[in-house]
Image (cartoon, helix red, strand yellow):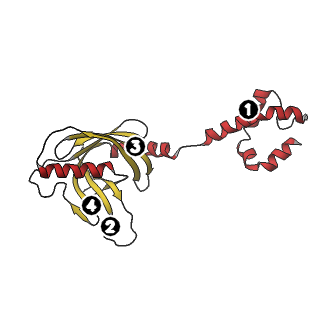
């Protein structure tokens, strides 16, 4: 019988989507699997295939969407205002604007925009800037994820040569940032690592290049 052939040829499909049996009967007003008239059953087969495809589509859950939901469900840690306290360069932490006497804070403010997109604004060494960040993955256990920065722009205020160089470095590293990590420091404050984070199982001089932000509000 047709039912035996279908179940033998597609055992997983038949098992996963057995609930479509009832749906097919509602649409066809016939028992698709146990119709004695094979010709009539074959005429009904395209409709069943359509229902089967819809069933597969309903079972799919995009990883990006799930990751974004995980972040947004705990966005109190990611959202807010952050202050840049250092930049890891391999195995050395550099100051945000080393060699300058200007103590202006470089900040990063994150606000939720849509399901997996955040708005970024802040103050760099000279200008105010803005961008968008799209989350592509996030692990709630390790508090690490991946993202992409786009639409980076800023105001056009002139600054000293050293401050302009500091700002250009900040924009360059921010634009190519692809990893982020949320941790707490020894003082219990939230810390955000943003850039290229390398996970090494052995001691190394290259742990990546990333910003170290401390949450201020």
Q: Tell me the distance, in whole angstroms, between the alpha carbons under discs 4 and 2.
A: 10 Å
Q: Earlier in the sequence, mark 1 or mark 2?
A: 1
Gap in angstroms between the C-alphas marked 1 and 3: 38 Å
Q: Sequence-wise, which precedes: disc 1 or disc 3?
A: 1
Q: Residue at x 62, y 38 (%)?
A: 58
As drawn, the label of residue 206 is: 2
Would you name the residue on which mark 3 appears? Answer: 134
Where is residue 169 drawn, in percent x and y? Answer: 23, 52
On-image quarter of the C terminus? top left
At x 88% / y 34%, what residue is drawn? 39
The 10 Å Cα crowd at callout 2, few under 14, some 14 to 19, many 20 or more, is some
Evaluate if marks 3 and 2 touch, with contact meaning CB atoms under 8 Å apart: no
Label 3 secondary element: strand
Q: Confirm or deny contact between disc 4 and disc 3 (CB under 8 A).
A: no
Tell me the tag on residue 88: 4
The nearer-to-camera label among 1 and 2 is: 2
């Amino acid at each position: 019988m047709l039912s035996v052939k279908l179940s033998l040829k597609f055992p997983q499909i038949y098992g996963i989507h057995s609930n479509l049996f009832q749906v097919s009967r509602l649409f066809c007003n016939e028992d698709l699997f146990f119709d004695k008239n094979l010709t009539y059953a074959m005429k009904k087969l395209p409709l069943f295939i359509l229902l089967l495809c819809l069933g597969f589509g309903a079972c799919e859950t995009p990883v990006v969407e799930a990751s974004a939901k995980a972040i947004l469900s705990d966005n109190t840690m990611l959202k807010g205002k952050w202050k840049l306290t250092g930049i890891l360069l391999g195995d050395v932490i550099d100051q945000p604007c080393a060699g300058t006497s200007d103590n202006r804070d470089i900040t990063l403010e994150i606000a939720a925009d849509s399901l997996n997109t955040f708005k970024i604004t802040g103050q760099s060494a000279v200008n105010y800037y803005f961008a968008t960040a799209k989350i592509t993955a996030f692990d709630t256990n390790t508090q690490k994820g991946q993202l992409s920065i786009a639409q980076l722009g800023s105001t056009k205020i002139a600054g000293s040569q050293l401050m302009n160089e500091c700002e250009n470095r900040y924009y360059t590293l921010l634009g190519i940032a692809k990893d982020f990590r949320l941790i707490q420091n020894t003082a219990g404050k939230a810390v955000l690592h943003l850039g290229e984070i390398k996970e090494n199982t052995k001691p190394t001089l290259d742990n990546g290049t990333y910003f170290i932000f401390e949450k201020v509000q």
